[in-house]
Each structure stands twice: as C-alpha cells, then as structure tokens.
Amino acid sequence: MKVKIKCWNGVATWLWVANDENCGICRMAFNGCCPDCECPLRAV
C-alpha cells in the first residue's frame, strides 16, 4: 500500500525559560506590563 501526502500543516510550540525576574533586554519584570500597555489591574 502506497500513501501520498497531499497536504501537511505543521504545528509547533515554544517556551521561554528564564531564571531571572526581569527581561534582559528591557529590564521590565516578566509578570508586569510593558511600558506601552496599561495594566489591567489599574483602576480606570
């Protein structure tokens, strides 16, 4: 029996493993908001 694949959709995942609490590029906390975003916990 021969099998011919007509279409294939690849799926991948990735995970950022960091041992620091702050980003090495922007020095912001990983669990905080970026400077351009408004924190969703902040009252409007």
Image (cartoon, rainbow, N blue to C red):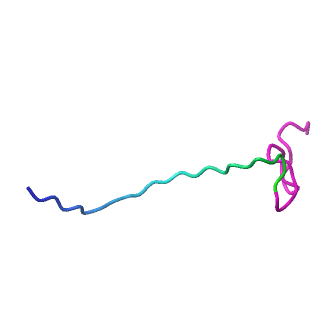
- Going by the picture, which residue comes out furthest to the left? 1
The foreground one among 39 and 23 is 23
**Residue at position x 82%, y 59% in the image:** 24
Q: Is 34 within the magenta?
A: yes
**Residue at position x 11%, y 59% in the image:** 2
**Residue at position x 30%, y 61% in the image:** 7
Residue 14 in picture, x, y percent from top left? 58, 52
- Give, as a single range, the part of the protein colored magenta: 24-44
Query: Is the N terminus in the top left, top right, bottom left or bottom right quadrant?
Result: bottom left
Query: Is the C terminus in the top left, top right, bottom left or bottom right quadrant?
Result: top right
Residue 42 in picture, x, y percent from top left? 90, 38
Q: Is residue 3 above or below residue 29?
A: below
| Rendered image quadrant of residue 43 | top right
The foreground one among 41 and 34 is 34
Residue 16 in picture, x, y percent from top left? 66, 51
Instruction: Give the overall secondary structure of the magenta segment.
Output: loop
Q: Is 18 within the magenta?
A: no
Q: Is residue 14 above or below residue 39?
A: below
